[in-house]
Image (cartoon, rainbow, N blue to C red):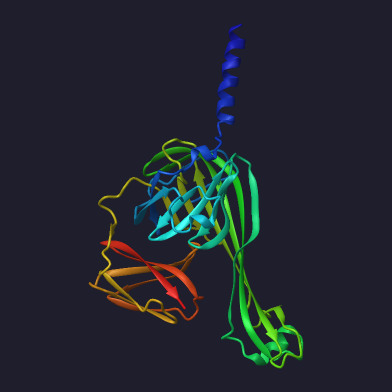
Amino acid sequence: MKKIKLFTIALAFLGSNTFAQITVTDADLVGVGDIIYQAYDTVPGTAITPGNTGANQSWDFSTLQVMDWDTTEFISPTGTPYASLYPNANICINEDGEFLYINKSTTGIELVGWGNIPVNMLLLPLPLTYGLTYSDGPNTIMDSSMENMFIPDSLAPFISLNPLHDKVDSLNISVTLTNDFNVDAWGDVTIPMGTYASLRVNAQETSTTSWSAYCSNSAGIAGGGWYPIPQQLFPSETEITNRYQWWSNDATVKFVVADLEVDSIGNVIDASFLTIPQTSAIAELTSNTFKVYPIPTTYQLNIESADADLSTYKMYDMLGNLILENSFEKNTKVDLSNVAKGTYLLNISTKKGSITKKIIVE
């Protein structure tokens, strides 16, 4: 009888360790009224690695440093400027005057709009369980036409393969996005704020940019139409971003515990993690600390600092992709000749603090 009891206890102990992985549902994540503090370490060091796949893992990110941080408040879409465009949005984020609209449901968290621009981007499938794999896309997140100012009309027959075409009227840019998710590990992750039982999600984002042209005949003797632009003229581009994220059902968390971006060979190049308010870490600089002009701009942006401290600028598109970055002292000129028209966010930081400005490239 005693042996049976000991055997039963041993089985229970083994079962609790073997099947201790958690499930993360929409009820475990942020809602209206929550405030999240997120820190960034842009030089995480070689000691920070994504680790291994599998069960009962342990990840130690306690050495991550707070090099920058921000506060995200999740509010109701009701009363925000573009709420009527996104009736299915139930959460909104105000990022320096730019409104992000999110739909959180039992099946996932989806970004549905950025300002007045509709977006179809799955941020996280739900519920998260160990072994889950999910692919979303390709989804078109940009489909925009513009007047042709780049391709000579003489190339119209080369593009359309119609010898009667002699005019390239317009250009179209299309961007598609595919998100793949793989919940490949579970265990305990430690960040400076504490240790949390978490699921690890390998999230891979693949964006493809392609171009087409509207070709026609100036005399109206041949019909016009849209044609893919040959690769020799406007090559399509495919970019892959690979991240590892740790999500927990701990009631004190409600957001991604840690997020590591890795390069093509698996080295960690950027890290973010939950933190507490950093009242003495990175201050918000005043608007007169830096002079940024002209806005709107076309080919060049000037940045002038009020002091001689070493400064770093990072320019992001509206999807959060890093477009440009560099360091400078006192002033610099940013070459925008290879930057597409659109709206961007420019973050400038020094040892005293940071500031973010909206940049429009025309």
Q: Name, please, the residue furthest toward the left.
A: 307
Q: Is residue 148 above or below residue 279?
A: below
Left or right: 213 in relation to 72: right
* Number of marks: 0
Q: Is residue 31 above or below residue 306?
A: above
Q: Is residue 294 above or below residue 351?
A: below
Can residue 44 be seen from the camera position used here?
no
Towards the viewer: 345 or 38: 345
Can residue 148 be seen from the camera position used here?
yes
Please tell me which residue is depicted at 49% across the width and 38% down the height of the picture: 28
Towards the viewer: 315 or 204: 315
Towards the viewer: 138 or 18: 138
Q: Is residue 35 above or below residue 138?
A: above
Please tell me which residue is depicted at 30% across the width and 77% down the height of the picture: 331
Left or right: 94 in relation to 149: left
Q: Quadrant of residue 289?
A: bottom left
On the image, the x and y values in percent for residue 180 come to: 62, 53
Q: Quadrant of residue 107?
A: top right
On the image, the x and y values in percent for residue 1 come to: 61, 6
On the image, the x and y values in percent for residue 15 come to: 59, 25
Please tell me which residue is depicted at 35% across the width and 68% down the height of the picture: 312
On the image, the x and y values in percent for residue 47 come to: 43, 51
